Image: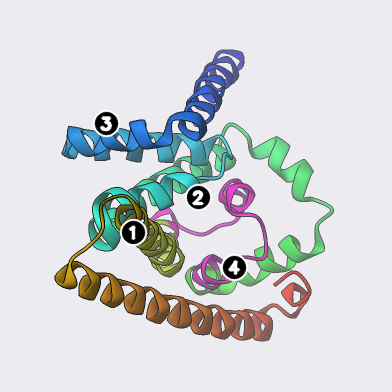
Amino acid sequence: MKKLLLFLAVIGAALCVWFLYLQEHLPVFMEWVRGQGLYGAVLVGLGYAAATVLMIPGSLITLMMGAIYGPWLGTAVVSPASVLGATLAFLLGRGVFRASMEQKMAGNPKFQALQRAMQKEGFKILTLVRLSPVFPFTLVNYAFGLTRVRLRHYVLGSFLGMLPGTLMYVYLGAAAGDLAKLASEGLGDTGMAGLWMKWGGLLATVVVTVLVTRAAKRALHEVVPETEATA
């Protein structure tokens, strides 16, 4: 147990240094990742998964993947990485950190209500929570380990529930990357047409994500009324 905690602490420190480096040298790092091809995508994906386990927000990486690879390939990198990180945290919450998570969530009535509801409809509730979070993403990954949801349902529900938000953030990163390219290099008529199409796609993605989130909020409240205030 002590060795595992020490290992996680070392990895966490390394990731903190990495994130500080990203903030100061982001353009250089992005060019390096782009130049590495598939290897760079795998490396950043593993870093994203590790950050999720260590409860470090991955929004910066999500936006960066969109700027480097575009909305579709970027989503293909980020989505599996986020599910992998969430699954590792889930397994740790069900195993090594179960006692500490039980103590942390014992006084939370909303989580207790979710836990009771998931005994009957685990996959449905988990997917709704992913679509309309009632707890911080990094925390709920561990907290779900306290429930009886099956691993395969957790993986599938997490993938489906997190996909709309992931696509939206990656799309935003792709659009921001195009704007940066426009400012530095300029774009011809063909490039401008593609840029307008991409921003139209971003707008459609945002609208769909908002509508899906609202629908998930209503559905979740119908099943677990106690979640209304947080949602």
Whether residue 93 can be seen here: yes
The residue that disc 4 covers is 118
How crowded pointer 1 is (Cα within 10 Å; few <14, some 14-19, many 20+) is rated as: many
* First of labels 2, 1 by sequence position: 2
- Estimate the x, y position of residue 108 in percent, counting from the top left: 80, 57
Choose mark 2 or mark 1, whichever is in front. 1
Classify 64 as above or below 226.
above
Numbered mark located on residue 165 in the image: none
- Estimate the x, y position of residue 113 in percent, counting from the top left: 73, 68
The residue that disc 2 covers is 59
Magenta span: 126-154
Spatial CA span between label 4 and label 2: 28 Å
Spatial CA span between label 4 and label 3: 44 Å
Position of the C terminus, as image quadrant, is bottom right
The residue that disc 1 covers is 174
**Quadrant housing residue 45:** top left
Q: Look at the image and say whether residue 97 sits in the magenta stretch.
A: no
Classify 13 as above or below 219.
above
The residue that disc 3 covers is 32
* First of labels 3, 2 by sequence position: 3
Spatial CA span between label 2 and label 1: 13 Å
**Quadrant housing residue 154:** bottom left
Q: Secondary structure at mark 1?
A: helix
- What residue occupies the far right of the structure in this picture? 107
Q: Are marks 3 and 1 in contact (CB under 8 Å)?
A: no
- Estimate the x, y position of residue 117 in percent, counting from the top left: 64, 72
